[in-house]
Amino acid sequence: MTKNKFVRLCLFSSLFALSISSAALANEWKENGGNWQYVDPAGNPAQNKWVQSGDRWFYLGGDGNMLKNSLVQDGGELYYVDAEGAMLAEAWKEVQDPDDGEKYWYYFTKTGKAHKNRSDKFSAKEVNGKKYFFDDTGKMVTGYVTAEGRKVDADNRAPYIDTTYYFGEDGAMYTNKWYRYEKVADDNLSSKLAGRQYQYFSEMWLYFDANGKKVKAENDTNAKIKEINTKRYAFDENGIMMPQFSVNNSEISIATNSNAKLRYGSEDNDGHLAAEYWAFKVPSVAMSDKDFDEQEFSWFRTKLDGTVYKNRIYGVYGRKYAFDEIGRMQTGFVVMNEDGTFSKQFDVDAFSSGDFKDTEAGIADVLPVIKRGDMYLFSSDELNDGSMKTGDEIYVTIADGTYAFGFKPNGVAYGNGSTLARHKNKFYYNGLRLDADQEVRYGIVKDTTQGSTNTWLVVDSNGRVVKGNRKVLRDGTDSWIIIMNNKFYARVSSSESPNAPKFRRDGSYWTYDSSLKGNDRFLRTITALDGDDDKTDKDFVVFDR
């Protein structure tokens, strides 16, 4: 053997001996009664510490045994080791709590630490594109959560009021999502803004935006309007979507034109603010507690922004409709104030002809209203029509019969405001056409349209003014009516003049009996009736205001 070979052999032997000595002194894993321990060269097991093996970490408990399928508390942090004892990282795990026996979900981050809320502020953890909330112990939270990160007990009084966020059964935060609440509280909870009590409803809807926050009004006076999937919805001060009417003023006994902006959300169309929509609904309590209590339905119409038409006359698809101060469509006779706002409505059968003629037979509270505004007529067929009626010959059945009325193209009554109007050779007063009695056939009207107080004109049963220079008519009572220069001259009974009165060249009218001879036929001169002469027969005098 050469010297060099001997030297190399000795060096190799020394390194091998050193390697063996080092191995003998290293920590190692040992099985002990079915448990794994990590022991030092002296055989002492590691306790209450993590040990890395390869790319995995394992935890040794107080007895030196490696933990498996367990939560690990270490340094104020919470970890989990699986069935092999390896630390979980970036993984979910459901664990049963030994104290209450309930199971809770945890999420363990890249470092193996359970994610938990570490402040008094709300903070959500995003996992695989979804957000979750964990309490200060690392437990995943479901249900209602306040803005401060406090879980709201679902059994508490109306948890939907206190909640800001909502997490589903899978723990995922509701974002851009509706939530249906069915357990409506028995308590007397209500929305001042919407004017409704919640216990009257079997379900309520909330919406959580892109940040997971409940959409709600900032106060109880103005609804929060939120566009969702191209549709607009209204939410009250508690975040409840209002499926019917919202009243943007809470301190009101009734919603009026001046104190409230009304919006309608259609129950029939998922509750969104229905644009250009007819709704047959009962008003809310804030709009009309009487209608609400009596469940009185009315028609409402919405604009493009979902607000209801109210307090005026509006056109809808070529027709016109009247709406009162809260938006109820009105039928029958409707009076609007001088400024165009709603004044009063009367059912057609609440009127008699005397009400329109300003007679003692009229209803005391009707004419003052008529006189201070403009009167219109809207169809009484509320369910199928309700639109404005215009024209010179609109027949309406009122309390004492069927009468013709006339309304201008803009809907205002001819003779509006208790003024006599002459239109197309006919007279109107508060819209009522002044017709002669059907049986009498003719009557007289005092024409005051030209400023005269003593001009009497003859009208027939269709209200038409009968003209003529020397005209004699026979009415339904066998009386003779004389018209001179287009004006009423006199009325003579058949007993006085068996035949039609005759006009003589001297310009006078005479009663006439053809059975007599010569001048004896002319019995007496008929003089024109003026002033307070015999025109008072109520069947013959149509109008004398």
Image: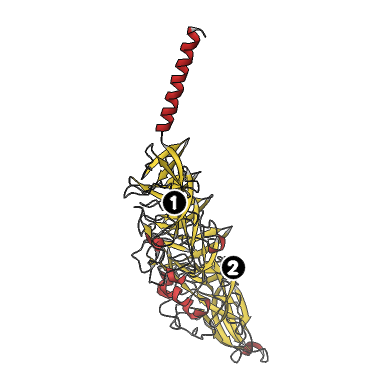
Q: Residue 456, image x and y in percent? A: 51, 75
Q: Residue 173, image x and y in percent? A: 46, 51
Q: Amino acid at mark 2?
A: Asp
The colouring scheme, among rainbow, by chain, secondary structure or one colour, is secondary structure
Q: Residue 451, image x and y in percent? A: 44, 68
Q: Is residue 371 or residue 68 the one in the foreground? A: 68
Vertical arrangement, residue 50 with respect to residue 232, above or below: above
Q: Residue 43, image x and y in percent? A: 39, 41
Separation of residues labelled 2 and 1 (CA atoms): 74 Å
Quadrant hosting residue 523: bottom right
Q: Which mark is residue 438?
A: none
Q: Residues within 10 Å of mark 1 (few under 14, many from 20)?
A: some
- Residue placed furthest toward the front: 1
Vertical arrangement, residue 67 with respect to residue 19, above or below: below
Residue 466 visible, this orientation: no
Specify the quadrant that holds the C terminus. Answer: bottom left
What secondary structure is found at the residue carrying circle 2? loop
Q: Amino acid at mark 1?
A: Ser
The residue indicated by pointer 1 is 70
Q: Are the residues flagged by discs 2 and 1 in contact, CB closer than 8 Å?
A: no
Closer to the chain start, of discs 2 and 1, is 1
Q: Residues within 10 Å of mark 2 (few under 14, many from 20)?
A: few
Q: Is residue 202 or residue 308 the one in the foreground? A: 202
What secondary structure is found at the residue carrying circle 1? strand
The residue indicated by pointer 2 is 385
Q: Is residue 378 or residue 299 the one in the foreground? A: 299
Task: Give the number of the mark in front: 2 or 1.
Answer: 1
